[in-house]
Image (tube, grey):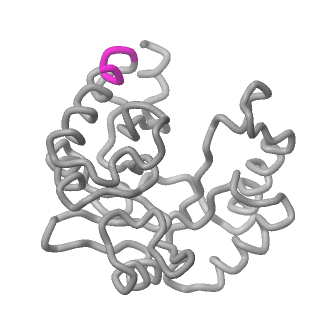
């Protein structure tokens, strides 16, 4: 626990899901289920890492939820939720409760707030494990050309792809992550919490 606290300046932990499976666990979940699972996970984070590691931004597992589920996250202290806000096969992907038109609107914003619900939404620009290594720099170069999206570039990884025992292990995963970090550094980006840019 002291080691976690010693690194609280640069590291945050948050609720993502109670467990990895099943897929899309909160797609049809109500307020009470999301709140219940969130409370359980937050309790354990505080137990092993401490309150100092808690932050007000998260990405819900699969980024799919009804508005009631997102309200539960808001009421648990999460002011902002990150997602892909992409359209795939004509349908929103990792876009919480938003329809196609709303998702397309959010995807063009650096940060967007649902003022009715009081929740901020942030687009994730690159999920590193989802792309081949040669695709990473071109994707990021395209993001940089967008004056809105480039204001705060959000990079995401799924940690399990590092592990040789994982069924979808990627031998070049470290190189992918380091390449994305090198691109960010070479292009003048610095690590930052969304809270530093939006809530300060």
- Which quadrant of the figure has residue 167? top right
Magenta highlight on residue 46: yes
- Magenta segment range? 44-48
Residue 32 spot, x, y in % from top left:
15, 41
**Residue in the picture at 66% in, 66% down:** 188
Total number of numbered discs in the rendering:
0
In the image, 105 versus 199, the foreground residue is 105
Residue 70 spot, x, y in % from top left:
24, 55
- Residue 161, compared with residue 102, is above or below; it is above
Dominant SS type (magenta): helix
Q: Is residue 175 left or right of residue 74?
A: right
Residue 192 spot, x, y in % from top left:
49, 54
In the image, 187 versus 61, the foreground residue is 61
Residue 44 spot, x, y in % from top left:
33, 20
- Which quadrant of the figure has residue 165? top right
**Residue in the picture at 44% in, 35% down:** 9
Q: Is residue 132 left or right of residue 153?
A: right
**Residue in the picture at 63% in, 37% down:** 159
Quadrant placement of the C terminus: bottom left
**Residue in the picture at 47% in, 68% down:** 123
- Which quadrant of the figure has residue 162? top right
In the image, 162 versus 63, the foreground residue is 63
Quadrant placement of the N terminus: top left
């Amino acid at each position: 626990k002291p080691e976690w606290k010693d690194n609280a300046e640069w590291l945050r932990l948050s609720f993502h899901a109670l467990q990895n499976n099943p897929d899309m666990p909160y797609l049809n979940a109500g307020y009470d289920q999301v709140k219940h699972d969130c409370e359980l996970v937050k309790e354990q984070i505080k137990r092993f890492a401490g309150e100092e590691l808690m932050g007000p931004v998260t990405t819900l597992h699969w980024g799919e939820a009804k508005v009631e589920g997102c309200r539960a996250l808001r009421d648990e202290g999460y002011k902002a939720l990150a997602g892909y806000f992409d359209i795939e096969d004509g349908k929103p992907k990792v876009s919480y409760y938003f329809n196609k038109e709303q998702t397309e609107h959010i995807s063009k914003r650096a940060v967007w707030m649902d003022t009715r619900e009081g929740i901020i939404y942030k687009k994730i620009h690159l999920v590193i494990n989802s792309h081949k290594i040669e695709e990473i720099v071109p994707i990021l170069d395209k993001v940089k050309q967008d004056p809105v999206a480039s204001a705060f570039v959000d990079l995401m990884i799924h940690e399990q792809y590092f592990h040789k025992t994982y069924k979808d292990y990627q031998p070049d995963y470290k190189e992918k992550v380091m390449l994305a970090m090198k691109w960010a550094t070479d292009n003048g980006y610095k690590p930052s919490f969304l809270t530093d840019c939006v809530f300060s």
